Image (cartoon, helix red, strand yellow):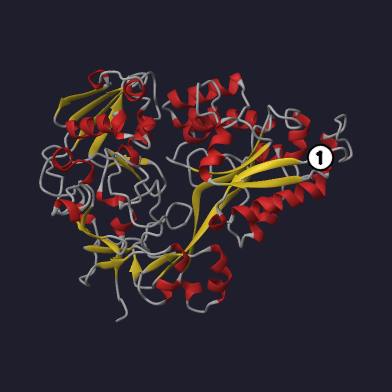
Amino acid sequence: APPTATTAAPAEEQILYDYGIRSGDPASHDFNRDLYCGGVASIWSGLLTYSVDFEPIPDWAESWEANADASVWTFNLRPNNGGFSNGDDVTADVFIYSWKRLLNPESAGAYASILFDILNAEEVNTAGADPETLGLKAIDDWTLEVTMVGPRGIFPVIAGYAACFPTHPPSVEEFGDEYTDPNITGQDVISNGAFILKEWVHDVRCTVVKNPNYWDADNIRPETIVNPIIPAEQGLLPYEAGEIDWSVVPLAELPRVQADPVMSKELEKWVEPLIWKILPGTNVAPFDDIRVRRALSHCIDRDRINELINQGGDPAYCLMPPGLFGYMGDDEEIRAIQAFDPEAAMAALVGTPFEGGQNWPTVTMIMRNEPELASPIIAEDIVAQVKDHIGLTIELQIMDFQAFRELQFQNNYELCFIRWYYDYPDPNNGYFDMFYSNKESGKRQAWSNAEFDQLTIDGKEEADPAKRLEIYRKAEIIMQTEVAYIPVVYRNAYDVYKPWVKGVPVNKQGYVIPNGNIYVSMWNTMYIEGREA
């Protein structure tokens, strides 16, 4: 693994040439209004952030506590902090302004629902309620009190997520939604993160520099980070040309990298917070019959799929990926429920019209068009395995995102193959957000179970981690026993790092943790030592 951070960076010039932005020119760097802006998240910091093990830790709030039932949370900000890059204070009112802006329907905030656990937040966002009724109160400049709709033990995890980042209120008032483009404002973006956006050359690069006013600035290693905007299809070319200091390795390139005498020594594996899974349409024949669903669930050889995609997906036996709170993949009872077992698959069909693997209709499995993620390879092998083991023919229907989403929310499919990337590192984002059924809209599947629904509410409300784990274990067993979903594989990713790149964060599993949509603090500990000229 790359050397972890030392106590002091060497005197060598600390300019890091990042992997870059591979999704095109950012729409903005305004994460407060648009979580999916594609910009540089590290210029912002919230009340809390996440450790390398995805646990909430202090950021602008140095401490926090709840009342007895976790229905009111109090965050104690660092006093007199002058934390914005222009010296403005990061106060309780900054977060109140920012969260009101996110919830304002006119903002069309891409992830306003992240705050719906706050009292009256959903009503403000969807029903025109007065923003002054929100459960947000500045006790003083450095104390933010947040009143929830009920007990919410989960809220510190939510508060650390990038969708809860603040904005800089005076900049919004002066420049509106364009405030994160220095080309329009004529000045550096005023932000409160570890870094400041110094330069945005559209379609070319975004350059950030260290924010000397960040509360932990003394421990931030790099002085400058250059983020080139690179077409995704360039893959490893910029790394091999020496233009960048580290790179993600496309899975198609992995065998070549592993065989390369130089790059093989620079290679690191990590597990993304992602799972591929199958959702059976429990309201549609033949998958309205639990026996058919159970037969399907025993057909999947997950190890074979992992081999097919160049070790790109460790077998999945539960909803939460390794490294996230709530992972249960080592639980033998849970692993056994949907274990690969072709004999059990055929046995499950006894007494159905499909006994012996006969009389099947042709069924369709919908999926998104994501060839860059190896989704088609995984789906095609699922199709082949199911045909081999129970004789069922599955046709794939590959759809664009919008069409796929519409069909999914209509719960109008026989099978749905879906890649779920965790928004925030908590089981609530899987069990409740994905599978809770007692809601008006946003249901991704027809399956419903009252006991399961209640467990997801209990898990959201409970603050004790051990009790939460037991709650989610019960929920997982219900889901798998009823075959509400079939876990297939997680997603492994691979990076290469030049030998002079030091201080790459590493989690307790020994995997590197690069920046993603959850963890955005990768650069804080990185530094350069012995760069080749």
Which residue occupies the foreground of this view, 149 or 243? 243
| Quadrant of residue 374 within the rendered picture | bottom right
Q: Quadrant of the N terminus?
A: bottom left
The residue tagged 1 is 344
x%, y% of residue 14?
24, 68
Q: Quadrant of the C terminus?
A: bottom left
The residue positioned 26% from the left and 44% from the top of the image is: 45
The residue positioned 67% from the left and 36% from the top of the image is: 333
Which residue occupies the foreground of this view, 497 or 446? 446
The residue positioned 32% from the left and 19% from the top of the image is: 120
Q: Which element is circle 1 on? A: helix
- Mark 1 residue type: Ala
| Quadrant of residue 410 within the rendered picture | top right
x%, y% of residue 471?
54, 27
Query: Is 129 rendered above or below residue 50?
Result: above
Query: Is 26 rendered above or below residue 299?
Result: below
Query: Is 72 rendered above or below residue 326?
Result: above
x%, y% of residue 66?
31, 24
Query: Is 489 rendered above or below residue 176?
Result: below
Residue at the bottom extreme? Answer: 533
Is residue 417 something one can see in this rendering?
Answer: yes
Which residue occupies the foreground of this view, 256 or 79? 256
**373 lies left or right of 222:** right
**304 lies left or right of 34:** right
x%, y% of residue 196?
20, 54
Question: Callout 1: 10 Å neighbours few (<14), some, many (20+)?
Answer: some
The residue positioned 67% from the left and 32% from the top of the image is: 281
| Quadrant of residue 19 within the rendered picture | bottom left
Which residue occupies the foreground of this view, 242 or 91? 242
Is residue 119 something one can see in this rendering?
Answer: no
Q: How many marks?
A: 1
